[in-house]
Amino acid sequence: MAKACWPYFDPEYETLSARINPPRVSVDNISCRHCTVVKIDSVNKPGILLEVVQILTDLDFTITKAYISSDGGWFMDVFHVTDQQGKKITDGRTVDYIERALGPKGHAADGMKNCPGKRVGVHSVGNHTAIELIGRDRPGLLSEISAVLADLQFNVAAAEVWTHNRRIACVLYVNDYSTNHAVHDLNRLSIMEEQLKHILRGSEDDDKVARTSFSMGFTHTDRRLHQMLFADRDYEGRGVTSEVDYPSSFKPKITVDRCEEKGYSVVSVQCKDRAKLMFDIVCTLTDMQYVVFHANISSSGPYASQEYFIRHMDGCTLDAEGEKERVIKCLEASIHRRVSEGLSLELCAKDRVGLLSEVTRILRENGLSVRRAGISTIGDEAVNVFYVRDTYGNPVDSKKIEALRREIGHTMMLNVKKDPGSAKAPEAEAISGWAKTSFFFGNLLDKLLA
């Protein structure tokens, strides 16, 4: 009997074009007076735009302008970026990192794993176990979740929490308090999973309203949160009124048109500018299986204008009205998930098991509802940032802030800041003795994994 012979494929053939034409990266501080110009030329590949924007975003850069072109087999991008203070990127180590991360080594298969981004790990990440939670939001839910973890002697080393349209999505990194290592006891993990599911379900019996899982694969945390809420269909709103969740100052104007000449669908977004806006939009388009061929990004004062020329991965444009409406709703949701009008509370204290449970309990008892949160541990210090409103979704009364200060002022350092996008908020000054700080989650997991 004749044996079937299959053609041989070199496993390195897939990266051949990238090795023949490696990415070229230029970091230019001369051409533009007010910003640093980052140029990337490379062979085009699926998801490359999101990779580049993710790296720049994780460095906490502000993208003031961008020009994207990836029609055909080549990818050419120009980004105008500044730091959080609006200054050029002049630090030599940062410039060197940009060139390495976006260059030939950074685009290799393992290059992205070395990026100081936010990643969701397989079952355990270094000395931490990664947990994903999604369910119906309600006042005090984060307090209940953290209380369960504290009772089971799990310490929350880092977490990111988003809420949108009465849904909550969390990615938490926990370890065993007694060993400071990831939890491998399947019985303990099973007990934790069951108790968290019970908390998320609340009074509802349907298991579909809440999910608890141990995350699988390496995924950027912000992108994973977008994916979780998108899969949960938070963009549908479920009949929730939008006055609180969608403040008028942040209401985006999104249109989908057709470019007949080139056969693209043109997605135009005009809204109030904010950090990571481009990442959120590109992330959502990518997860919806759309490919960005060209884009023009600009900002003028407090407003941003972004235009994307896209097609679906199968080459089709957005022709059906229902499809256009879905894209508009999903992009609106992606923009609003990170918006937090009102106050941000930054708390710093010596880390201990149950600290997050104590803090969130105090917030709940003072009538504060957490809209978004970032939890981090650096050394033996816990730094937590909470974006809060009252339990009805209204701005926080200054009396509640004073009551909060009196209750926790002796055990924790508190910094109260008005969100830049908020029209009205009570007076917010830092507690004397602690300088104002900004919370950056981007490099946290590298510290945890070190």
Image (cartoon, grey):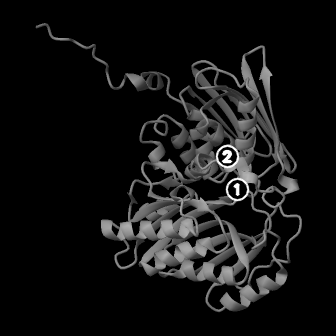
Compared to residue 16, the image places residue 414 above or below, namely: below
At horizontal 56% and vertical 77% (from top left) the residue drawn is 356
- Residue type marked 2: Asp
Residue 239: x and y in percent read 76, 53
Residue nearest the observer in this picture, 348 or 366: 366
User: Which residue is the extreme one toward the top?
Assistant: 2
What's the CA distance linking mark 1 and mark 2?
Answer: 9 Å
Q: Which quadrant, please, contains the C terminus? A: bottom left
* Residue 338 numbered tag: 1
Compared to residue 266, the image places residue 337 above or below, namely: below
Compared to residue 266, the image places residue 276 above or below, namely: below
Instruction: Report whether 319 appears left or right of 251.
Output: left
Residue pointed to by mark 2: 280
- Residue type marked 1: Arg
- For the residue carrying disc 1, how many other residues have a C-alpha within 10 Å: few (<14), some (14-19), or many (20+)? many
At horizontal 71% and vertical 36% (from top left) the residue drawn is 327
Instruction: Report whether 334 appears left or right of 352.
Output: right
